[in-house]
Image (tube, helix red, strand yellow):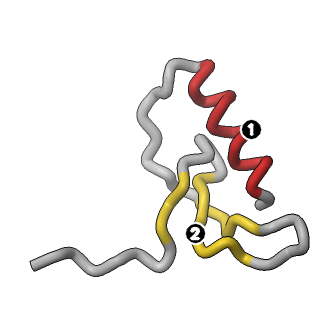
């Protein structure tokens, strides 16, 4: 998924009132040249999700 596509999803989701989303499906976010940006985004709402997830702090 390109960064601009994730941004568009976020805007559309915000227009719906930002309902709750469990982020069931994610995709790696890519620069225009195809390199990964280092995070993923929900394919439903566009939320940025850190990938790989950091371990919980103890």
Which residue is at 86% across, 75% downward? Answer: 34
Relative horizontal placement of residue 30, taking residue 53 as reference (left or right): right
Q: Which residue is mark 1?
A: 8
Q: Which mark is residue 50?
A: none
Q: Quadrant of the C terminus?
A: bottom left
Quadrant of the image occupied by residue 25: bottom right
Relative horizontal placement of residue 25, taking residue 51 as reference (left or right): right
Quadrant of the image occupied by residue 28: bottom right
Residue 21 in the image: x percent, y percent? 46, 41
Is residue 17 placed above or below 22 in the rendered structure? above
Is residue 20 placed above or below 47 in the rendered structure? above
Q: Earlier in the sequence, mark 1 or mark 2?
A: 1
Residue 11 in the image: x percent, y percent? 66, 30
What crowding class fits label 2: few (fewer than 14 Cα within 10 Å), some (14-19), or many (20 or more)? some
Q: Residue furthest toward the right?
A: 33
Which residue is at 79% across, 78% downward? Answer: 35
Mark 1 element type: helix
Q: CA distance from mark 1 to mark 2?
A: 17 Å
Q: Which residue is mark 2?
A: 39
Which residue is at 40% across, 75% downward? Answer: 53
Q: Quadrant of the N terminus?
A: bottom right
Mark 2 element type: strand
């Amino acid at each position: 998924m390109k960064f601009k596509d994730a941004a568009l999803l976020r805007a559309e989701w915000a227009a719906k009132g930002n309902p709750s989303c469990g982020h069931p499906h994610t995709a790696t976010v890519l620069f225009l040249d195809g390199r990964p940006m280092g995070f993923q985004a929900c394919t439903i709402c566009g939320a940025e999700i850190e990938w790989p997830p950091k371990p919980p702090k103890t």
